[in-house]
């Protein structure tokens, strides 16, 4: 799991959010194509 709760800086939080959104996007695409 991503340890996003440990991100303290704004940039770090932004990166964590992007990683989560990207992961969800990829997972949704995998489910859509299967």
Image (cartoon, rainbow, N blue to C red):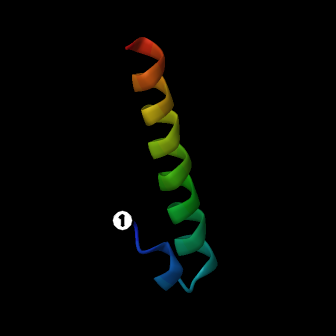
- x, y (%) of residue 5? 52, 80
In the foreground, 22 or 29 = 29
Which quadrant of the structure image shows residue 10? bottom right
Instruction: State whether residue 29 is above or below residue 33.
Output: below
**Quadrant (top left, top right, bottom left, bottom right) of the N terminus:** bottom left
In the foreground, 15 or 5 = 5
Residue pointed to by mark 1: 1
In percent of the image, x 43 and y 34: which residue is there? 27
User: Few, some or many C-alpha atoms within 10 Å of disc 1 (few <14, some 14-19, many ≥20)?
Assistant: few
Quick one: which residue is furthest to the right in this view?
10
Instruction: State whether residue 24 is above or below residue 11.
Output: above
**In the image: residue 7, left or right of residue 14:** left
- x, y (%) of residue 24? 51, 42
**In the image: residue 10, left or right of residue 29:** right
Q: Is mark 1 on a helix, strand or loop?
A: loop
How many discs mark residues in the rendered view?
A: 1
- x, y (%) of residue 7? 51, 81
- x, y (%) of residue 9? 58, 83
Instruction: State whether residue 6 is above or below residue 22.
Output: below
In percent of the image, x 45 and y 44: which residue is there? 23
Quick one: which residue is furthest to the top in this view?
33
Instruction: State whether residue 13 is above or below residue 15.
Output: below
In percent of the image, x 37 and y 14: which residue is there? 34
């Amino acid at each position: 799991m991503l340890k996003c709760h440990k991100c303290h800086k704004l940039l770090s939080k932004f990166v964590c959010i992007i990683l989560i959104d990207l992961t969800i996007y990829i997972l949704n695409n995998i489910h859509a194509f299967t």
